[in-house]
Image (cartoon, grey):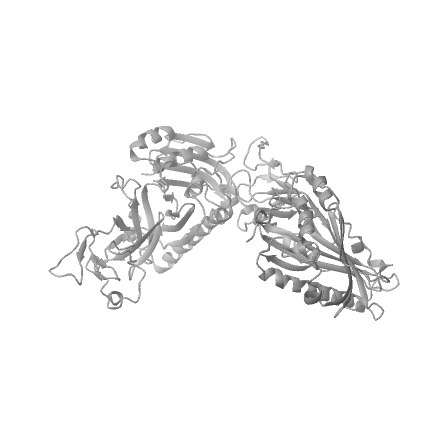
Amino acid sequence: MIEAPDYNLGSFEFPRGWFMLGSSEELSGPPKTLHYFGKDMVFYRGETGTPHLVHAYCPHMGAHLGKNTTSYIVRDGEQVQGDSIRCPFHGWRFDASGNCDHVPYAKKGFVPQQAKLKTYIVVERAGIIWTWHDPEGLEPDRDLPAFEQWDQEEEGWVRWGIDNYDVLNIHPVEVVDNMADFGHMMPIHGSIEPAYFDNVFDGRKVVQRFDAGHRTLVGDHGAVLSLDTWYDGPSILQSRMIGEYPSHMLIAHTPIEKGKLRMWHALMVKIPGGKRATLEQAKLARAFQDASRDALAQDVEIWANKEACVQPMQIPFDGPYSRVRQWYKQFYNPRAMEAEFHKKADGIVVTFGEGPRADLLPA
Amino acid sequence: MAKTADYNLGPHTYGRGWFMLGSSEELGGGAPKTLRYFGQDMVFYRGESGAPHLVGAYCPHMGAHLGKNSTSYIVRDNEQVQGESIRCPFHGWRFGPDGQCDHVPYAKNGFVPQQAKLKTYQVVERAGTVWMWHDPEGLEPIRDLPAMAEWDQEAEGWVRWVIDDFGAMDIHPIELVDNIADYGHMAPVHGASWPESFENIFEGDKVTQRFAFGSRHIRASDEEDVRSLDTWYEGPSFLQSRKEGVFPYYQIVAHTPVDDGRTRLWHMMMVRAGAGGRPATEDEVAYARAFQVTMRDGLAQDLEIWENKAPCFQVLQIPFDGPYGRVRQWYKQFYNPRSMSKMLQEKTDGHVVTLEAPAEAAE
């Protein structure tokens, strides 16, 4: 991608929703510096392990809370106390709500009331740290997906590892376009003999239902792979596959700057038998995840090298790219306009095969 | 990087003319190659006949890069080039050598979108090198690429050149073209002692340098103490030099803008080393090679200057210098509309003598 053009999505630069910040594993230990939504932030864990996300710069004099190794605050292991974090410059301490609660050199317990660190909502779930981003500064009005398979190891689910694709110079809309992309399934993902492809637009959700053969993933000629894939909000894609080895996939992306994002992939697999997986079975699940990761890598190779597409040259046999982009606009506009955007996009579009199919949508 | 606008050359960022793209060896068969010249990403490929084609790098459908892909099944299955057509790895759209889309794999009834057209460029392969015509106005070539006929005269003793690739450097091409007027650098940079005469002839889109001198380190034979050298540009981008004598040679120094202010450079030289009009022997071929290496090393001395110098927008010209100002005026014709060529040429046509030949040598 050469430069980030204007996709004319709405009044916000970054969308409203839940976004992945990184894996729990990567976000542990001393405070970490993060950069998302064009902002510098610091992530830290309280002494009990509770995750916190705050603005990177101290309100006192602008020192960076995360980028320090030489201050005695840091060397003496005093930067995090309870759920509070101290600035390495003058030692001002801020509690989990961002209020200054201690200034080491002030007398009589004086703390400046106006000294407040901006804090962000953070949730840790399924081995991942998430944040709520809202250009209007409002509270979440929707839940982060449950990823309940993470806690169903006793029923045979094998937890995912996190594949980090790191930074891509592409606007997220070009990643979300994939929901409508029937034509790339054969060249990029090795699908053969497609049977059905549709998209269901339902409020904040868009679903892709795709039935086809596959050159490597299904053994018998004529066997059909049935995939339901959906976005819940602007950034979290999940996909479920039913079969002998049911799987649940996650592809998450988070904007870093305009036209730049970070992307992750993860896959949980259920081992047949309904019991906790053996070591061998867990290895098999990991191999499934690797195959799924490699399939996504083929999209990533396209994304990493393409030029910006402000307007796809849509032909009658393509999926509904423009409707997906219309659906996606709701996240770049005030919450008050949501219903209006839903009305414009809601419905079913069948791109391939006889439809619309009447079976149940993912919950 | 100093840009065309800084040198006040004219409205076009890049000149009009034939430009070298690379050696035939480097641009051989196999996978399509990614090129960047004139600030544009391009893809070079050979049809099944071996014919060279050059197209815009990005697919008009959704902007995928036609050349940077190794994982699409189109590429893995070796289906990217069919006949003289090339397929996009993303959705498999195929484009003919005229750039027109001629197949969409997932479309029915042979549907092809008429508006889907890939930009194509005019390419010529000659004497082991590949060239393109670049014209800011999109017009047809104004003159032919030189014949380089010696390439096919091995029977008469000519030894084919190899291509010396100097790679890209951060310099505007005008500072390379200045060299045609550069009398003063001949002794310090090229070791040309005992100059006899130096003159420039400006004729339309051609400028010639005539230089007679004795050389410190190149001596074709004992009889040839004084060498007389004709060197000329036909158009903006490649210098030719031809010398008769015991070992006649034909040399090209070609340059092509990569981006505004960045230039790639090549050198090549053919020598008639086979004495008496028969194919060269092994020893004579080795001599021709050594001769090319000597000439390449001479050019490398210019290169060391170019790679390290500051941009020169206005030469501090003294009466004993060659006509830099006139060369730059001559060079402007390629950065202006073709309709102005005649007017611009009339400004420079003529003969400039920088060093007068001694009376007896002038006869």
Q: Vertical placement of A235 versus A287: above or below? A: above
Look at the picture and state if B303 lies above or below A352: below
Q: How many marks?
A: 0
Tell me which residue sits at (27%, 40%) in the image: A142
Q: Position of residue B350 (x, y in %)?
A: 76, 48
The percent position of residue B65, horizontal first and vertical second, equals 54, 45
Image location (x, y in percent) of residue A33: 33, 57
Which picture quadrant has residue B99?
A: top right
Q: Is residue B214 left or right of residue B66?
A: right
Task: Please tell me which residue lies in front, A307 or A285.
Answer: A307
For the point 56% across and 52% down, which residue is it?
A: B2
Please provide percent x and percent y for residue A83: 20, 57
Most extreme residue toward the right is B276
Asked whether the viewer can see residue B28, the reply is no
**Relative to residue A193, is residue B327 depicted above or below?**
below
Apparent side of residue B31 relative to residue A161 in the rendered image (left or right):
right
- At 68% from the left and 54% from the top, the residue drawn is B324
Q: Nearer the viewer, residue B256 or A188?
A: B256
Give the residue furthest to the front.
B319
Name the side, left or right, on which B99 lies relative to B65.
Answer: right
